[in-house]
Image (spheres, rainbow, N blue to C red):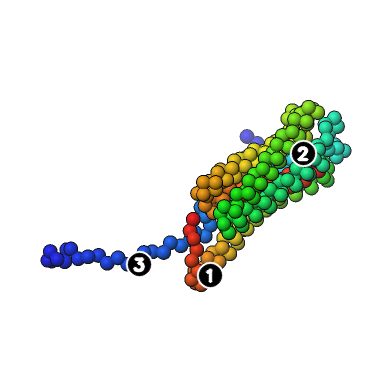
């Protein structure tokens, strides 16, 4: 066994599991930061044409905001309806119930 | 405890007043259903928008596919919109006097039938011209989107006919009319969006 191989083995054996785990995570983070290349594969952000990219973004925003708008609109309408009914109750008017 | 105290009469208080529901149950249920159908059409329109944006050279309709009858469908769309307006008038007539809603409700149904029938004749002509579900994505999207709307229109017309039948027998309630009307309003209001994205 050469002297060169002994020292790293001794170092690995002497450090705790926690220290080795932290070291592995730091090494992985450095590699993730340095090694990858931008491949432009996302069809929303990096599409071939401007029209296609714009269509993706517009339809994404549309499908995200539409249900929120419907729920908010229904909530406002129900709140206004509740106030109308309360106002009629306090005014003492009679309403037919179907 | 004596026998008399066991047979004491129970004094009833005043009957509880029934509060009118904020939104009729039928209308609330129909609104929830309409919300799901709005998202259904929103998904179709979004897919159509993205596919259309991917065409090479922005050629839409694609080469070799027949053009859609834009002007005739515009007239047909007017009939559908008038049907919606007439249904609103039928509602106000119903609130005034129930029997007064018969004619506007019937007129609204007839205009809706005209719309669906005319769309059917358009389809026959387009099929003869070669635009089919399999001919291109253009044809596939057209029949999918417009066909889905047609199915909704037929269902809504069925609801309106049911309401007219009940009105004829003088058993239609306001909440029932509001429920079927809500679905027809959805069919009417979603059509201009579909026309704009598919035909233009």
Which circle's residue, 3 or 2, is located before the other in the chain? 3
Estimate how packed mark 2 is, as few (under 14), some (14 to 19) or many (20 or more) residues with alpha carbons within 10 Å. Answer: some
Q: Quadrant of residue B68?
A: top right
Residue at numbered disc 2: B51
Residue furthest to the right in view is: B57
Residue indicated by mark 1: A87
Look at discs 3 and 2 and give the one toward the viewer.
3
Q: Is residue B19 above or below residue B68?
A: below
Residue lying at 74% horizontally and 40% vertically, measured from the top left: B48
- Dot 1: element: helix
| Mark sitting on residue B125 | none
Chain of the residue that carries numbered disc 2 in the rendered image: B
Q: Position of residue B100 (x, y in %)?
A: 60, 53
What subunit carries mark 3? Answer: B
Q: Residue furthest left?
A: B2
Under tag 2, what secondary structure?
Answer: helix
* Distance in Å between CA atoms under marks 3 and 1: 23 Å
> Is residue B82 left or right of A79 when viewed as pictured?
right
Query: Which residue is label 3 attached to?
Result: B14
Q: Nearer the viewer, residue A32 or A17?
A: A32
Residue B197 image offset from top left, x and y in percent: 77, 44
| Same-chain check, marks 1 and 2 | no
Please state the horizontal and vertical placement of residue A85, each as a whole percent of the image: 52, 65
In percent of the image, x 52 and y 55: which residue is there? B24
């Amino acid at each position: 066994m050469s002297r060169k191989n002994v020292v790293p083995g001794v170092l690995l054996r002497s450090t705790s599991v926690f220290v080795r785990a932290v070291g592995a995570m730091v090494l992985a983070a450095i590699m993730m930061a340095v090694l990858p290349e931008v491949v432009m594969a996302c069809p929303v952000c990096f599409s071939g044409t401007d029209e296609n990219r714009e269509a993706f973004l517009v339809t994404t925003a549309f499908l995200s905001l539409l249900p929120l708008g419907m729920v908010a609109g229904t909530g406002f309408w129900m709140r206004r309806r509740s106030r109308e009914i309360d106002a009629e109750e306090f005014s003492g008017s009679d309403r037919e119930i179907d | 405890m004596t026998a008399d105290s066991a047979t004491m009469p129970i004094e009833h208080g005043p009957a509880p007043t029934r509060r009118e529901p904020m939104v009729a149950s039928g209308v609330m249920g129909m609104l929830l259903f309409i919300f799901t159908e709005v998202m259904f059409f929103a998904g179709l329109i979004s897919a159509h928008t993205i596919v259309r944006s991917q065409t090479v050279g922005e050629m839409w309709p694609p080469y070799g596919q027949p053009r859609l009858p834009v002007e005739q469908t515009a007239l047909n769309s007017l009939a559908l919109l008038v049907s919606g307006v007439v249904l609103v008038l039928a509602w106000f007539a119903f609130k005034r006097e129930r029997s007064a809603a018969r004619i506007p409700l019937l007129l609204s149904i007839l205009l809706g039938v005209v719309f669906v029938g005319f769309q059917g004749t358009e389809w026959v002509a387009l099929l003869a011209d070669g635009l089919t579900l399999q001919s291109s994505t253009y044809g596939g999207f057209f029949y999918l989107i417009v066909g889905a709307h047609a199915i909704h229109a037929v269902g809504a017309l069925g609801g309106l006919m049911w309401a007219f039948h009940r009105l004829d027998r003088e058993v239609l309630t306001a909440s029932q009319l509001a429920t079927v009307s809500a679905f027809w309003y959805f069919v009417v209001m979603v059509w201009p969006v579909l026309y704009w994205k598919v035909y233009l």
